[in-house]
Image: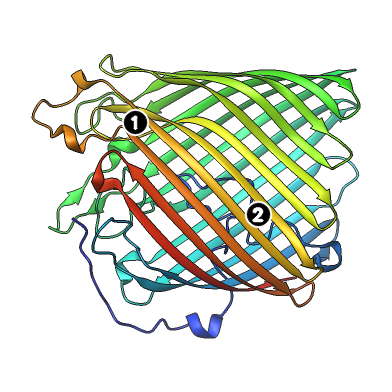
């Protein structure tokens, strides 16, 4: 059980800081995953040109500092079905971007943090931060090398199905790099890419003071991908792609004796469109298969529809669509992993040039793959998680005072329905954000 520790205290330095936030509404065409609390999401998807911050020129670079502060109220901070606990928390989030302004090549740097303080339940406090570096080398006409690296220090949300009931949210690091090469052969473009990412969890402590060992969750993931695009006409192309991956856990077996390392592949075929900026993105069919080293585990696989589309029907309105399928890691006893399917839509409309409305809706279906033979016969079958569905809706309103200052207000509703009651929850969250861009 979670220990509910209540500590009444004033947060020195927070009120005078009134600086930044947990980005108010996750209005990017990008969905938060259990392994990433979404600290790089933005409260505003796209500002009108007249309200875009110019940044500060530093030689051939543009420096873009920003800071936000959010006041949030959550009526269910532990994401449980009964005996809900409410609290008010503050987020301070500074950000810094350094963007190159070169004719050839590119080099960009981003850094930021999300510092959260709860009014009553201080054990839930956290400090997330991240740094990223990415760039492009133009080798010669039609040939480019792309690269990137990232390091994130994060916490595991209480709504994760794998959280370990620690006194505090479990902390972990997520780091890695990617390298890609793009070659253009007239109408045919080939993209070859490789990336490696490592996830490293810290140990936790439960309510009895016992150490919760998270070392069996540490892992690395290597992915090699190839995509071929054929341009049939300007702004329209068809593509095929494939990727192979290897998930390698640091320990040969977890605390329950399972080997969770795996190998998998992904195949895609679809169309890419760019109708002069009105409709941009990909629509594709794919098949995913993940095979596990432990013979007791069933494969996680399936067909799915994928899409990353940005539709701009007018200068005042933008609509984003995302459909995505992915095999996800889990430490559920007897489950090899789960097949996650996300369906999301995000809309931003300018009621006035200075008044932006944001709406977002998403639905995620998580299908756990497990072999009953891999489970302890003494385990209660009514506590075995097989399926969970997560519904989320966001609404927000942003007032732009100038290029450099805005205020936002928003509401988020999230509900999870699972075939095991202990995983059911619903939560209501309200936000008020002040933002400053340079």
Instruction: Please report the residue visible at 25 percent of the width from the left and 55 percent of the height from the top.
Output: 166
Instruction: Please report the residue visible at 30 percent of the width from the left and 32 percent of the height from the top.
Output: 386
Counting from the top left corner in percent of width and height, residue 311 is at: 77, 43
Reading the chain from its start, which is encountered first: label 1 or label 2?
Answer: 2
Instruction: Please report the residue visible at 59 percent of the width from the left and 27 percent of the height from the top.
Output: 305
**In the visual, does 268 lie left or right of 334?**
right
Instruction: Please report the residue visible at 78 percent of the width from the left and 55 percent of the height from the top.
Output: 317
List the residue tagged with mark 2.
110
User: How dense is the environment of label 1, judged by Cα within 10 Å: few (below 14), some, or many (20 and up)?
Assistant: some
Residue 411 numbered tag: none
Look at the picture and state if 153 lies above or below 179.
Answer: below
Q: Nearer the viewer, residue 89 or 412?
A: 412
User: How dense is the environment of label 2, judged by Cα within 10 Å: few (below 14), some, or many (20 and up)?
Assistant: some
Q: Can residue 228 be seen in this view?
A: no
Image quadrant in which you'd find residue 58:
bottom right
Task: Give the structural element (helix, strand or loop) at label 2.
Answer: strand
Look at the picture and state if 313 lies above or below 22.
Answer: above
Q: Can residue 278 be seen in this view?
A: yes
Q: How many numbered badges does the structure rendering display?
A: 2
List the residue tagged with mark 1.
250
């Amino acid at each position: 059980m979670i220990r509910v520790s209540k500590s009444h205290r004033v947060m020195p330095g927070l009120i005078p800081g009134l600086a930044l936030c947990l980005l108010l509404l996750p209005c990017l065409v990008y969905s938060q995953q259990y392994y990433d609390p979404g600290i790089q999401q933005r409260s505003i998807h796209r500002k009108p040109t007249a309200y875009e911050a110019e940044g500060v020129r530093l030689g051939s670079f543009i420096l873009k500092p920003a800071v936000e502060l959010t006041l949030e109220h959550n009526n269910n901070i532990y994401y449980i079905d009964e005996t809900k606990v409410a609290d008010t928390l503050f987020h301070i989030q500074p950000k810094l971007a350094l963007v190159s302004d070169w004719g050839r090549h590119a080099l960009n740097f981003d850094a930021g943090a999300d510092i959260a303080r709860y009014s009553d339940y201080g054990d839930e406090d956290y400090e997330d931060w991240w740094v990223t570096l990415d760039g492009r080398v133009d080798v010669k006409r039609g040939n480019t090398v792309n690269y990137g690296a990232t390091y994130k220090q994060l916490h595991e949300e209480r709504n994760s199905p794998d959280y370990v009931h620690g006194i505090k949210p479990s902390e972990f690091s997520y780091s890695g790099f990617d390298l890609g090469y793009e070659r253009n052969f007239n109408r045919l473009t080939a993209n070859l890419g490789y990336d490696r990412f490592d996830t490293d969890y810290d140990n936790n402590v439960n309510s009895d003071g016992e150490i919760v060992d998270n070392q069996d969750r540490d892992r690395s993931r290597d992915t090699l991908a190839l995509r071929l695009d054929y341009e049939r006409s300007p702004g329209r192309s068809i593509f095929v792609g494939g990727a192979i991956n290897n998930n390698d856990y640091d320990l040969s077996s977890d605390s329950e004796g399972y080997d969770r390392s795996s190998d998998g592949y992904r195949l895609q075929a679809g169309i890419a469109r760019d109708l002069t900026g009105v409709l941009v993105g990909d629509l594709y069919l794919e098949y995913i298969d993940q095979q596990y080293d432990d013979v007791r585990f069933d494969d996680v696989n399936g067909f799915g529809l994928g899409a990353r589309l940005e539709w701009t029907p007018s200068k005042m309105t933008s609509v984003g669509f995302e459909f995505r399928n992915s095999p996800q890691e889990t430490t559920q006893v007897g489950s090899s992993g789960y097949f996650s399917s996300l369906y999301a839509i995000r809309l931003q409309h300018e009621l006035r040039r200075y008044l932006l409305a944001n709406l977002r809706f998403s639905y995620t279906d998580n299908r756990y793959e497990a072999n009953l033979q891999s489970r302890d016969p003494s385990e209660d079958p009514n506590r075995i998680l097989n399926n969970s569905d997560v519904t989320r809706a966001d609404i927000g309103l942003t007032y732009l005072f100038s290029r450099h200052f805005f205020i936002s207000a928003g509401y988020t509703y999230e509900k999870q329905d699972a075939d095991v009651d202990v995983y059911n929850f619903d939560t209501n969250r309200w936000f008020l954000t002040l933002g400053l861009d340079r």
